[in-house]
Image (cartoon, rainbow, N blue to C red):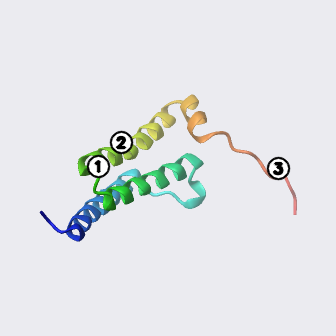
Amino acid sequence: MMPEIVLILIRSIVAFILLFLMARFMGKKQISQLTFFDYCVGITIGSIAATLSVDQNVKIINGLVSLAIWGLFPIILAYLGLKSLVVSKITDGKATILIKMEKY
């Protein structure tokens, strides 16, 4: 049996590598372009990765599957949003115009 610190180190490295790959695959967005949904997904993925790293009661395969699902669903929804206006309105909402035709 490995010491607890070694297990945490291994689990953290695995979670970090998977998060890095997910970030590269999911694409880059400016903070101003993030929707509330994207923000929530990011927080959830980070929380899952943190739990996977330190909670030894969670099987590593279960954490990896959960990260994969939370990584793939936003990609699938983004693709469907490009193809369907209805899906886009549901996931991204409608922009609100704050200033209209204002002259300086």
Q: State the mark number for residue 69.
A: 2
First in residue order: circle 3 vs circle 1: 1
Q: Secondary structure at mark 2?
A: helix
Q: Amino acid at mark 2?
A: Ile
Point 54% across, 60% down: residue: 30
**Inter-mark Cα distance, 2 to 1:** 9 Å
Are circles 2 and 1 on residues that touch, CB within 8 Å?
Answer: no
Residue depicted at x 69% and y 44%: 95
* Residue type of the residue flagged with mark 1: Leu
The mark closer to the camera, 3 or 2, is: 2
* The one of 71 and 88 positioned closer to us in this rendering: 71
Of residues 99 and 69, the one drawn nearer to the viewer in this rendering: 69
- Left or right: residue 18 versus residue 71 is left
Q: Quadrant of residue 6?
A: bottom left
Image point (25%, 52%), residue name: 60
Spatial CA distance of label 3 from label 1 is 47 Å
Question: Horizontally, is 32 left or right of 38 in the view?
Answer: right
Q: Which residue is mark 1?
A: 64
Sequence-earlier tag: 3 or 2: 2
Q: Considering only vertical position in the picture, is 9 above or below 84?
A: below
Location of residue 24 in the rendering, given as x and y in whole percent from the top left corner: 36, 57
Estimate the x, y position of residue 3 in percent, counting from the top left: 18, 69
Mark 3: few, some, or many residues within 10 Å (few <14, many ≥20)?
Answer: few
Q: Which residue is mark 3?
A: 100
Up/down of 27 relative to 68, above or below: below
Q: What kind of residue is marked 3?
A: Lys
Report the residue that reaches farthest toward the right.
103
Q: Residues within 10 Å of mark 1 (few under 14, many from 20)?
A: some
